[in-house]
Amino acid sequence: MSIYLQALLGGIATGAVYGLIALGLSLQFGVMKIINFAHGSFLMVAMYVTYYSCTYAGLHPLAAAPIAAVVLFIVGWACQRFFIDGIYRKESAREPIGVLIFTTGLWIFLDYFALALLGPDSRMIDSPWANEVVIMGDLIFTYPQVAGFILAALVTVGLVAFMRYTALGRAIRATGQDREAASVLGIDSKRVYQLSFAIGLGVLGIAGALLLPMYPVNPFVGDIFGMRAFVIVVLGGIGSIAGAFWGGIIVGILESVGSQLIPITYAEALIFLLFLGVMYFRPSGLFGVEKE
């Protein structure tokens, strides 16, 4: 029984980080109504930023998290300001297809640029902290698992509070609900989009820093987690920040507990089976709100 309890709690801890990865994607879609296919590649960038911060600057992995967040925030703001915003101006559609094409190309470019620049080798940080454990009876958790769960939960709660109780957060929500009505009320949708995309990638920077002690980084690591992020966003409810967190928990549990009962490849298939079921029976997601 302790094996399954270990798997359950470990899945919750890992799933919280998965949810944090999906959170930025959910925010971007909820506000801008775009699908960022380069999301996983940006996660890869965050992991490399963390890796070099720890390896060459000697920083603790948790101390590198704010650096990764700031770098990804700036990258997100610049990407929205100089590329995506131009596509919005040239296309009149609410969900311009040009953004999908651009982010798909950006995904491929970032992956292969990293491959050419950094090589194909997978890299892990050399930190004793990453191997330290917390023992609770028969249960054993690594420090990265514990820290990942706590920080992912705190970031999610903080972002939910920011969106609900600050003027800027309410402006972002209003723009996501109705861009034209928000503009009539004096909200600058262009600035809101820039901040939304930047905040989404800033959160992803923290997720990348929390993920690196548990997973090695290579130029294509983001493809795996990017696909998982899309599944989590749909499970939790597209545009729901809290839903992304709980969707990540569900995926983490299915992955961890499922691998104890069936082969890991079948456990992965179980995740996508749940994804298809939710898409068919409840397209708004498990925690989303049905809309007419």
Image: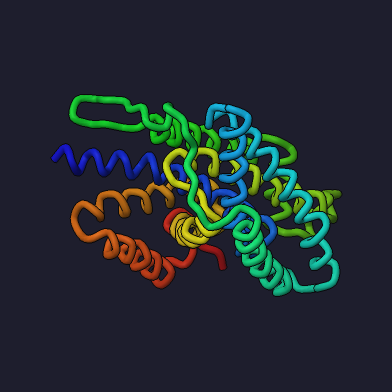
Determine whether, in the image, residue 85 is placed left or right of residue 73.
Answer: right
Q: Residue at x 22, y 39 (%)?
A: 5
Residue 170 image offset from top left, x and y in percent: 70, 43
Q: Residue at x 81, y 73 (%)?
A: 91
Indicate the quadrant where residue 32 lies: bottom right
**Residue 227 in sight in this render:** yes
Nearest the viewer among 170 and 276 is 276
Nearest the viewer among 284 and 139 is 139
Nearest the viewer among 50 and 190 is 50
Indicate the quadrant where residue 203 lies: top right
Q: Quadrant of the C terminus?
A: bottom right
Q: Quadrant of the N terminus?
A: top left
**Residue 39 in sight in this render:** no
Determine whether, in the image, residue 17 is placed left or right of residue 90.
Answer: left
Indicate the quadrant where residue 63 lies: top right
Q: Residue at x 40, y 46 (%)?
A: 15
Residue 86 image offset from top left, x and y in percent: 83, 64
Relative to 101, say whether 30 is above or below.
Answer: above
Residue 103 image offset from top left, x and y in percent: 67, 65
Determine whether, in the image, residue 131 is placed left or right of residue 175.
Answer: left
Q: How many marks?
A: 0
Q: Residue at x 18, y 29 (%)?
A: 138
